Image (cartoon, rainbow, N blue to C red):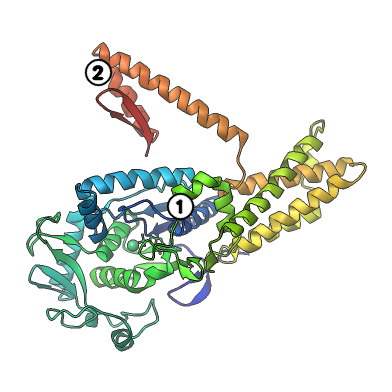
Amino acid sequence: MALRIYNTYTNSVEAFKPLADSKVKMYVCGPTVYNYFHIGNARPLLMFDIFRRYLMYRGYDVRYVVNITDIDDKIIRSANEEKTSTAEVAAKYTQAYFEDCEKLGIRNPDVSPKATDHIDDMIELVKKLVDQGIAYPAEGDVFYDVKKLPQYGKLSGKKIDDLKSGARVEVDKRKKDPLDFVLWKAAKPGEPSWESPWGKGRPGWHLECSVMSMKYLGNTFDIHAGGVDLIFPHHENEIAQSEGATGTRFVNYWMHNGFLNVDGEKMAKSAGNFFTAREILEKYKPEVIRMFFLLKHYRSPIDFSEERIHESQQALSRINSTLANIDIALKEFQPDAKKINGSTIINNLREQFLAALDDDFNTANAMAKIFEMVREANIIMSAEQIQQRDLEALLRIKNTILEFNEFLGIIESEQNKISEVEQKVYLDILVEVRQKLREQKNWKLADFIRDRLVEKGIELEDRKDKTVWKKF
Ligand code: AMP
Ligand code: ZN
């Protein structure tokens, strides 16, 4: 069965057809780096990374972009509270974001563009809209004229008139229509700002995502994702901006994850009902958190509770202990490679697992198939005597689970653990050697080491007393 995705734009499950046959271009709205992200924010980061990896497993060449909003009202507020600059707040929490993602087993996106690195592109897009009469400046701000886009409201399924009566829209006399939204904000005293044709100012949040997604994925791309709260106004406004400027369709598939709730209410910083991913990771292994999210379909709401996490922990232990027992059972086993594909039950479960994921990434149903495989293995192992073909089935189960783990990331691999420790040892040695080279003023070779490491995704930071490395 081919992959089908629920598309918020059409309100239906559709066959997935990427623009280019084997390539998928995917964008996820990333964090606003003003604080540590909470475990609710982790849901889209974690699930969409799993889907990206599943697409890769299915043979697609995926280009995956997750932006970083590093200028915004909340960052300005944090900077004032922490008595520091917005740049410092953003740098601190950007680093924390990467650290927490790594701990959660979320792979780095292909591109993590920062808003402040794309201000010129944003000004260009606003200019285009103003030139076309779709946007209008007003006292240093620039507004989008929603009346100019007949399909405004299509994504959220709202009509302009309903939106006006239903939504709490800011009253601003300078707006032609109450729903017009800001593209560019005039500078306020003490806030960071950039020169623009409309005076000093900064970009609006919706603009950032339009610009960065199109820059790295093209004017039209395959998948744009984020939480359901982003449908309106964020994604609606992104469509307005992008389609207004380019005249072509912006995104083919809009995907939205459901909320992580606490007592039925969305986990949110503003509600104060949140736990940071860091806090949770102090108590639970990342694999448990991944399991917790995988046990539910990404569009369903999940209630957060320690009890639920314990259930995920137990589910994970069931898989791990079965895998460990399989290893014991297989210790003396010399497999006949040709026969390993033999078991019909396992092959069926394997197909059902993939079919579940192809059905709008239904991880809940897919995980049920993993548990059936585990049950099957336990039945085999409970027999008094294990036949040769049973051992083949056990090996098949183990290999299948480990193969799927490539994108699920729920099984801690011994190999991974060793290689991470080794990696640290070798990197520390390289840093030390480079330090010696610098002491001998052999800058060329020292720079060579740094440049080669950067190519591999390792950044060196020369501090006063020592050099530290970090992955980016
Ligand atoms: P924010 O920092 O609020 O812009 O959120 C960043 C991402 O996390 C967005 O895709 C949000 O939709 C998503 N998000 C925020 N809160 C939750 C939650 N409680 N459950 C699931 N996703 C969330
Ligand atoms: Zn966005």
Residue at (34, 49) in percent of width and height: 112
Q: Give above or below for 87 relative to 259.
A: above
Which of the pair 92/127 is nearer the observer?
Answer: 92
Of residue 81 and residue 189, the one placed in the foreground of this image is 81
- As drawn, is 272 to the left or to the right of 465? right
> In the image, what residue type sits under mark 1?
Val
- The verdict on label 2 being within 8 Å of ligand 2 is no
Q: Quadrant of the N terminus?
A: bottom right
**Residue in front for this viewpoint, 75 or 68:** 75
Quadrant of the rendered image containing residue 439: top left
Query: Is 461 in front, or is 51?
Result: 461
Q: Quadrant of residue 302?
A: bottom right
SS label for mark 1:
strand
x 57%, y 29%: residue: 418
Left/right placement of residue 122 relative to residue 347 reads left
Mark 1–mark 2 distance (CA, rounded to whole Å) = 38 Å
Instruction: In the rendered structure, find residue 62 and report the number of the disc placed on it.
Output: 1
Q: Residue most toward the right?
A: 384
Would residue 247 be seen by someone viewing this image from the given angle? no
Residue 64: x percent and y percent?
A: 41, 53
Q: Quadrant of the C terminus?
A: top left
Q: Earlier in the sequence, mark 1 or mark 2?
A: 1
Identity of the amino acid at label 2?
Trp
Please tell me how crowded label 1 is: few (under 14), some (14-19), or many (20+) other residues with Cα within 10 Å.
some
Q: Is residue 383 above or below residue 414?
A: below
What residue did someone put label 2 on?
Answer: 443
